[in-house]
Image (spheres, rainbow, N blue to C red):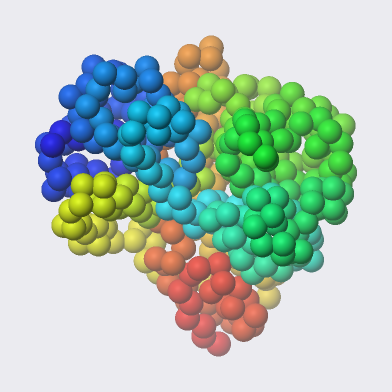
Amino acid sequence: MKIVCVRNMPFAEEAFSTLGTTTVLEGRALTADDVRDADLLAIRSTTRVDRGLLEGSRVKFVGTATIGTDHMDIPWLEEQGIAWCSAAGCNANSVSEYFVAALLCLAQRHGFTLAGRTVGVVGVGNVGRLVVQKAEALGLRVLQNDPPRYEQTGDSVFMPLDRILPEADILTLHTPMEKAGAHPTFHLADTAFFQRLKRGCLFVNAARGAIVDSDALLRAMAEGLVAHAVLDTWEGEPAFRTDVLDRADIATPHIAGHSFEGKVMGTVMVYRQACRFLGRAPAWRHEPLMPEPLVPELDVEAGERQPEAVLREIVRRVYDIEADDRRLREGREGGAAARAAHFDALRKNYPMRREFPFTRVRLRGAPEPLGETVRRLGFQVETAG
């Protein structure tokens, strides 16, 4: 059994070597020659999997350690009898924590309060559900849009875009990227979409870059329809447009889901699916290999401060989203190729980021509602007078 895994999959070699001879290569540079003799292929979103890569190879199983699959030609894989899987939900909590960090950062930067505002969540799958939960923990009123789920359930909680766009103070996208089907999302956020927004909206895209028409977004910002933009995904990435970068309040290199736990669970889920495909019981466990948390404990004095200021301090000390923003902006000079190389390098060398549940917060002098909010965001909490 020969297995090819891409780099940036934590513990991939340890996991897949229990199934066969494992080679680890760069994902974006993977070629047909690299995989010709492979039986299994484990990738992330930087690898395009299609006829050009796999035709004539021995590959019978492809697993992507990501929630998205738009980098895979699934109809061709199925036509060739090649089994495939994704890691849906692996980094959902990571993306929801990114959303929290972004909102708290912008609220502090621009001097507004989140509680009581309305957020529209477009796409309420694995990620969107957790975004809804954390938005409610922050005291936001939540409106949800997910046409496929509405068709499946008939639940009136899923509202049409025409209802949520004019009401949302904050709008966040969490849909897959689909060019066809009953509910295509390519350029979902186009000129007509932005024209329906509540003026002065805060706009977040941590889903897929091509869901947003970049020119339409720039026009919406110029016209004041979008006051602030948080962009983690970009049309044409890894290259990114500097005119879009310059208008974004927070700009990051597709790392919303890059918590260490999110990436590890991607490896785990693909490994387990590969075992199922091979008819073998999983023999590898990731738990003994997990490192100690980077920020195991925090001592925070609430005092007379506003609750959202306390939340901002707690979140920033575990995940500083502005550091990710600064690193991306450092690569704005040069041509498209240089920017793309910078973008890829940031993703490849992304510093370890642990999720909120691995930090215990000792809150002093905090009212119980604040402690409960911190718990609902995922932290372990101890309160003291």
Does 102 sit above or below residue 182?
A: below
Does 20 sit above or below residue 145?
A: above
Q: Is residue 210 visible?
A: yes
- Where in the figure is residue 230, as x and y percent of width and height? 65, 41
Place residue 227 in its image quadrant.
top right
Q: Is residue 21 left or right of residue 177?
A: left
As drawn, which residue projects farthest toward the top?
335
Place residue 153 in its image quadrant.
bottom right
- Where in the figure is residue 149, as x and y percent of width and height? 65, 55
Does 383 sit above or below residue 136?
A: below
* Residue nearer the viewer, 109 or 253: 253
Residue in the image at 63% along x and 76% along y: 370
Q: In the picture, which quadrant includes the C terminus?
A: bottom right
* Residue nearer the viewer, 9 or 113: 9
Q: In the picture, which quadrant includes the N terminus?
A: top left
Residue in the image at 50% along x and 33% along y: 70
Residue in the image at 48% along x and 21% along y: 340
* Residue nearer the viewer, 120 or 76: 76
- Where in the figure is residue 32, as x and y percent of width and height? 28, 18
Residue in the image at 45% along x and 24% along y: 342
Does 316 sit above or below residue 177?
A: below
Q: Is residue 13 left or right of residue 212?
A: left
- Where in the figure is residue 189, as x and y percent of width and height? 73, 35
Place residue 42 in its image quadrant.
top left
Q: Is residue 24 visible?
A: no
